[in-house]
Amino acid sequence: MTLLSQDPNWWKTATIYQIYPKSFCDSQAKGTGDIQGIISKLDYLKHLGVDAIWLTPIYQSPMIDNGYDISDYYSVNPDFGTMGDFDELLAQAHQRGIRIVMDIVVNHTSTEHHWFQSALGDKNSPYRDYYIWKDPIDGGEPNNWESKFGGNAWELDEKTGQYYLHLFAKEQADLNWENPTVREEVKRVIQFWAKKGVDGFRLDVINLISKQQDFPSDDSGDGRKYYTDGPRVHEYLREISDAVFQKYGSVTVGEMSSTTLEHCQQYSSLDQKELSMVFNFHHLKVDYPNGDKWTAADFDFIQLKQIFNTWQTGLNGKGWGALFWCNHDQPRVVSRLGNDTEYRVESAKMLGAAIHMMQGTPYVYQGEEFGMTNPGYQDLAQYRDVESTNMYDIMVSHQGVSHSDMMDILRQKSRDNSRTPMQWNATNNAGFSGGTPWLDIANNYQEVNAENAVADLNSVFYFYKRLIELRKQVPVITDGTYLDLAPEHSQVFAYLRESGNQQLVCINNFYDNPVDYTLPSNIGVSQAKCILGNYRTSQADIQCEVQQLQPYEVRILLIERNVEA
Ligand code: GLC
């Protein structure tokens, strides 16, 4: 018996919960989370009401990039458990009506993968052409492309004198998708997991797989224009989709790095010849002044609204987007765009509503559902993330940034901000582990934890639960068009969703001071009902064109016009 919905479009009204297994729940007191830990929390996830879990990589890996460096696609990292544990997770999740989405990392493999080990130092290896090798130019790197984690993107293979490409860490070698055998291997991997009954796949940096084959140096940038949304990417995705995704009815979400709306319309086009939906990150670059992540900066609120406007209207009727603020690469949203002290609860709810009431499929990252915050580390030694430690090295040792400025930047921008262990309760180690956690827990765990949230009907947890339910109950959330009602307002983000006889208005105050906001007169406020909010408001308040909003207040208004026979 399965509780899984049989609707092939189930993911359009679904909410997907992201688990970073290393930091979720440790069943064995070793300081790192595992699959049995996840199984023990399935009832919690069921209570929240999510439809699927996206598991970040659990495969065999040296863990240089916490599993995004895979050394064997067909086995489970023993730190997380066994294949038997995985099968049990799949069965137990399905019994509760929860689907499983696996992370597929096929832009690159770990340099410990046996393909790379065979290819390294041997031009005649059958696996040499699985990777991208180039001769030196002028005695140095083949071009000036930069690794996303800092430094040049090429590493020398001393024995053969050639360089291999790594767009990420040097331990993550890019696969050569031009080689049809590589594409066959990728299909085999995905098929293996689909056959097991896995319901879907999240495809890591999938728009980087096709590189421009003349590999030119980039006069004006880091090289990304030569491999982002590259020449054959759509062809490759259609090939994989045709061979595997469509056959197994898998839901797919592609992680699209520095992409464009036009490409995303195609990746996620409604005929589903490529993918079901896309993650793009433009809305999370509003605190990267001039595109530079590694500066401490406030966010640009007007730009944030413009980006949502472009993507919400641009994908409507053409493709499908993932809705998210948080993941394992992003700082906690309540610390980033909200207020993680005085208005933590209010701003966490407001931010949740602001994103969940848009069109797309929402993703909730572990701990977001009760307002977990950045940890505010004071000590460099507390950081573990390869990107953060690389950037510290480059910026402090080579670019003259001071230690204290860099610490400010890391406190705001490091990926470790979201990777701190899940705060389950107020006991030792936040109930995450009986051993020493691999990464320090945020100091606020005695107050901010899942147990407290579940015990309090006014918590962020129940607000998220309601957002998840509303998507299933109110069709305009899934189907409606999108209109920004106040694009120039310096403090309020208000948008209208409309379809059939329903209008939904989501009004958000993004700041910590009260504000008045006047709704346009064509919105039928006299019939409006507030279906969710984070402050108590009277019906009279709602039926007035002027909305007086408290700090970080959100109101979701539903207007159902009477349809005359
Ligand atoms: C994606 C992952 C990130 C990883 C990178 C390289 O962006 O989300 O965690 O480091 O790809 O695989």
Image (tube, grey):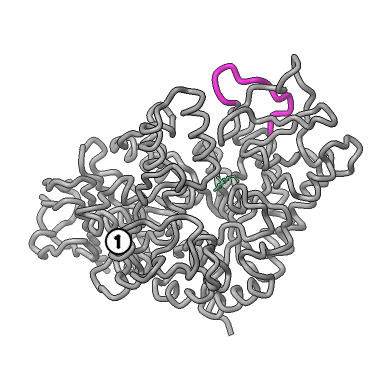
* Picture residue at 67% right of the left edge, 52% below the top: 62
Q: Specify the quadrant that holds the C terminus.
A: bottom left
Residue extending farthest to the left is 540
Between 381 and 533, which is closer to the camera in this rendering? 381
Q: Specify the quadrant that holds the N terminus.
A: bottom right
Residue 219 forms part of the magenta stretch: yes
Vertical position of residue 238 compared to residue 39: above or below: above
Q: Position of residue 364 (x, y in %)?
A: 42, 59
Counting every numbered tag in the picture gives: 1
Q: Position of residue 387 (x, y in %)?
A: 53, 40
Vertical position of residue 68 compared to residue 370: above or below: above
* Neighbour tally class for label 1: few under 14, some 14-19, many 20 plus, Cα within 10 Å: few
Q: Which residue is mark 1?
A: 501
Residue extending farthest to the right is 124
Residue 458 forms part of the magenta stretch: no
With 293 as the anchor, is 219 left or right in this view? right
In the figure, residue 306 lies in which quadrant?
top left
* Picture residue at 60% right of the left edge, 26% below the top: 223
Q: Which residues are magenta?
A: 211-222
Between 427 and 247, which is closer to the camera in this rendering? 427
- The answer to whether one can see residue 472 in this image is no
Between 352 and 434, which is closer to the camera in this rendering? 434
With 10 as the anchor, is 411 left or right in this view? left
- The answer to whether one can see residue 451 in this image is yes
Vertical position of residue 286 compared to residue 61: above or below: above
| Magenta stretch secondary structure, dominant | loop
Q: Position of residue 468 (x, y in %)?
A: 38, 66
- Label 1: state its secondary structure: loop
Three-letter amino acid code of the residue under disc 1: Asn
With 410 as the anchor, is 130 left or right in this view? right
